[in-house]
Image (cartoon, rainbow, N blue to C red):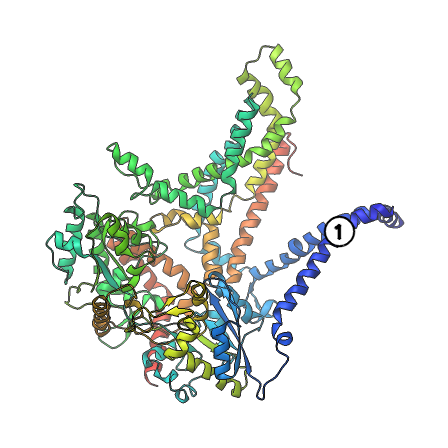
Amino acid sequence: MNQRWKRTLLPFLAAATIAVAGCGSNEKEANPSQSNRPEEKAQAPVEITVLAPTYGESTPSDIERIQKLNEKLNVKMNITFAPSNNYQDKLNAVLATNDLADITVVWDPSNHAWANAIAQGAFWDLTPYIKDYPNLSQIPESIYNVTAINGKLFGIPRVRPTDGHEAIIIRKDWLDKLGLPVPQTTEEFTEVLEAFTKNDPDNNGKADTYGIGASGSPIPQTYLLSMFNGPFGFAPMFGFVKDDSGRLTPRIASQETRDALSYWQAQYKAGYFAPDFPVMKGTQPFDLFIQNKVGMVITNINQVIGPPDWQTELRKSVPDAVVQAIELPAAADGKRYYEKASGSFGILMINKKVPEEKLKKILEVMDYTSTQEGFLLVASGIEGKDYEVPNPKLPLVTKPSEAAAALNSQHNQWIPGYFNKYLRAESGLWSDEMNDYSHQLVDSIEKQSVLDLSLGITSVTWNEQNADWSKKINDMIVNVIIGKNTVEDWDQLIRKLQSEPAWDKIVQEVNESYSSRNNQ
Amino acid sequence: MGDWKAAIRRDKYLYLLILPGVLYFLMFQYAPMWGIALAFQDYSPFLGFWHSDWVGFEHFRTFILHEDFPILLRNTLGINFLNLLFFFPAPIALAIMLNELRSVKFKRFVQTTIYLPHFMSWVVIVGICYLILGQGEGIINKIISDYGGDKVDFLTNANRFWTMLTAQSIWKDAGYGTIIFLAALTGINPELYEAGQIDGANRWQKIRYITIPGIKSTIIVLLILRLGSLLSVGFEQVYLMTSAPVASVADVFDTYAYRVGVQQGNFSFATAAGLFKSVVGLVLVIGADRMAKKFGEEGVY
């Protein structure tokens, strides 16, 4: 009897023991601070908790660079990392359970749940504080404008360059071989597309090359439309333009968008696109470029440094290959259209539960980490030990040691960062001339690029329609380009969306927010 | 009254043994069912479960009257009927063929090989499909064009999309599906085959008159259960295979619920769509079960 009882219960006991043991070890990990640091300084360091995404592993908060930061500012940073691929879920969970850290990295504060929390006063309004911090007030005004919600700043932007993310990467050696100039206009661009496809630029006797490689899945590359039309895709309802009366109207309904679609439809029909455009994803066209199959792709200026480095890879099979970044061609009206990026990716929001004294300490940390010195310390570590600077002219281009490389993709996530407008156009692998050329390219693009007028504006109605409408619009763009649908089908889709009540509501909301933003 | 107390006391260890299982079902299967109430509310995470507005059948009405509903229904049923027609019989045919093999070694080898794809995730299978069927670098199209044919748009042709899904399902799961039929086949009395042998039945006749009738009840039970998911399509597979050119035939209830429910944060609507599917499934299962019983079969319960 006793024996049988034991036999029945044993597995459960074992399971229970494992469960209890599991809980115990978790607790221990959760509170390392109490046991590790019994001695207190004269003025105890301020403990600051952070929640940030990680693209690699999650690293401890006691590594050397963070300790240096702690000592310098008399703080104790305690950073929790959550994997980037379900970071949004994690954010929603901490919000729903009201378990916010002092600093939270929020990718999209216009998201329904976060917009509500902001309205309910869950976060500090930082607008009055920024001016007291010399480095934070250095961040370009335009970035703050786009980050602000109803004119108020609820987070420090994580700065990113505003230009240099759209340029044509072209096979300069193919151009030279075919005796073509660098395309400046749409006509010249079309000629290059044709020559790259038909005139056998790789000299193998077969017409097996293509003018351009682009991706259409899960959404078509926005640059295909923005280069004829201005910023496309990242604001409410794909962005807005001002009409003659000064009112903002949706760009998708414009004649230029329609013209761009029929232009690409003709090019696709002529066979200038690399095949599989509708199913190709983000970086797949780049692979075709490296394989000597396509002559042009549109992407970041320094995308070509890889890894793998495009030119080095190409030269393994084509010794005289030359890869160069050039400007987009001018549209029919003779102007070049670039979209200016918002200049930030996500904001660092501060919990309203934090007292004002601590808030100032937190802003001090933000202020320091937005300087070159502070940025390099947290993002790259200690010079000479964690990284080297291969080219002294480019102090921000670092070459991490092997051990430090794994840490870098994480700690740069929870700081505002140092604003370097050439970030997408420099490389330690390039010669000085190459870097100079790319810097000039960015300068030239910067003068021409425009910010979408509705960027940073939250439209509640758009948020409700976004997933459904975006899919319909994006699918139609791809289908028109590949000729499965006609441009008239596009018109019909736009007319149908226009006939829905949500269309007018979105336009009205965007216009109201826009005029209230500009009147402040 | 005293009876069941005595019964519990007598078999208390047996009850203790099933307790974890019962608790599991109560906690993880039955308790969350109250979440169905979401479908009848205008749920907002901030107001919470208890304070959200009650809207009755509003979400169901919008869902069924939605202009995309007929397309979603057509796609879902289309994909599932193709599956029912080709994917469902595939494991049966395979199992019967395996059963006819006489070399045990060869049989084991084939079984292992055809089970393998089941353990690959859809991501991998879709990836392989893209690699071999693409128009640029795809090996199949390379072969076709080398022999002078025109390249075929396997991945982007809306007319081929459903066939493509069915073919993938067969490749992935037909082998693994044979297990249950092979088990049923071992239950057939070998004397029947011997008797058939003496009566001069050939192999085909033995399959036709002994094997198939022997596993008929298993086939019917599985078919009834299968009908329960007539409105569900494997989300992962369809979602991964979707691209703009095939979007019109690839949008099914599950992808729609994901888009509206998860991406647009309309939880109540997604729950209503899910519940609608389950109710239709339940009706189909019960209906099919009654039918089976009418024709003298055993049915599911």
* Image coordinates for residue B36, horizontal then vertical, percent: 59, 58
* Image coordinates for residue A384, horizontal then vertical, percent: 40, 71
A247, above or below B183, in the image: below
* Image coordinates for residue B49, horizontal then vertical, percent: 60, 67
Residue B90 is left or right of residue B224, and the answer is left
Residues packed near mark 1 inside 10 Å, few (<14), some (14 to 19) or many (20 plus): few
Residue A298 placement: quadrant: bottom left
Q: Along the line of sight, which residue is nearer the eye, A405 or A485?
A: A405
- What secondary structure is found at the residue carrying circle 1? helix
Residue A39 is left or right of residue A338, and the answer is right
Q: Is residue A153 visible?
A: no
Q: Of all residues shown, which one is farthest toward the front?
A: A384
Q: Is residue A309 visible?
A: yes
Q: Along the line of sight, which residue is nearer the eye, A141 or B217?
A: A141
- Chain bearing tag 1 is B
**Residue shown at 15%/67% (left/top)?**
A333
